[in-house]
Amino acid sequence: MATVERTITQAQIDGYAEASGDHNPIHVDPAFAATTMFGGTIAHGMLVLALIGEAMHEAEGERWLTSGRLKVRFKAPTRPGDTVVATATAVKETDDAIDYAVQCARADGEILIEGRASVGLGGAGR
Amino acid sequence: MTSSTRTSISALPRGHEFPASTFTLSPGDVDAYLRAIGDRGDYGPVIPPLAAVALGLNALQEHLSLPKGSLHTGQEVEHERAASGGETLTLTGRVAQRSERQGFVISVIEFEIAAVAGVAVRARTTIMAPAGAA
């Protein structure tokens, strides 16, 4: 199992907005975000999902970059100050692919992102 | 980016095709992305696929706007081949699904990002946006 743990800060969210060009006010405008159902800013889904990408890269290296597959649902928001643990756990291996269960969870156990990932083996196994 | 050419995602019908966009991610853009997500992994010259998707979504916003209160609720990604920093990438996309529920429009945007050698990444992004919002 590959694991990546990180505490998400508002500074990181602001930095991600600059790098990605996604300045949606739900992420970067505390005054606007306070009026929404979340009551404050939340991290970009793609910022949190990147932790799963990092875990899969750690587990599979170049195979992840050239043959990776990923399908996830964003289940709960990540707020500034949340410590997020991303895990990628191999659950099935055939000659064609290795399948992983992937998730991001908060320290209190709430699942933030959940889904499946895989890498291709081209019929040759590992 | 000109706001007059952009349409709210909640107003786009199923089947809408976005004009092809070209963009380049320089090695500096990729480094800035990796710093922003806090990833210190060694990717060499390769663009991490999720970086291509995140920055491709930004390129799509040349053609669509996301109303305040829009949420990204699902993501699928298929990596077909590695693309390198500095390559010119072409993004093509469409609205693959559209439905309405409880005052929100749920749109699935399908897109491909191609390098010279062929498609590098295919993605499906699900976005929930307030219905009727500009």
Image (cartoon, rainbow, N blue to C red):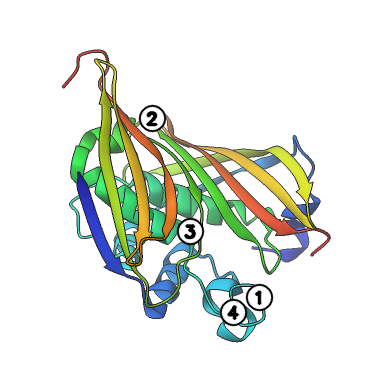
Label 1: which residue?
A36
Q: Is residue A59 visible?
A: yes
Q: In this view, does A6 lie above or below A36?
A: above
Dot 2 falls on a residue whose secondary structure is loop
Label 4 in the same subunit as label 2:
no
Residue sitting at x 31%, y 43%: B84
What's the CA distance linking mark 2 and mark 3?
A: 22 Å
Q: Where is residue B86 in the image (x, y as percent from the top left)?
A: 35, 49
Residue sitting at x 60%, y 78%: A33
Dot 1 falls on a residue whose secondary structure is loop
Q: Where is residue A6 in the image (x, y as percent from the top left)?
A: 28, 66
Subunit that carries the residue with mark 4: A
Q: Which mark is residue A45?
A: 3
Name the amino acid type tagged 3.
Gly
Residue that protrudes farthest toward the bottom in the picture: A31
Subunit that carries the residue with mark 2: B
Q: Is residue A88 above or below residue B72?
A: above
Name the amino acid type tagged 4.
Gly
Q: In which quarter of the image is the N terminus of chain A?
A: top left
Label 4: which residue?
A39
Total marks in image: 4
What's the CA distance linking mark 4 and mark 2?
A: 39 Å
* Label 4 close to label 1 by CB (< 8 Å): yes
Q: Where is residue A88 in the image (x, y as percent from the top left)?
A: 28, 44
Q: Nearer the viewer, mark 4 or mark 3?
A: 4
Label 2: which residue?
B80
Q: Earlier in the sequence, mark 4 or mark 3?
A: 4
Subunit that carries the residue with mark 1: A
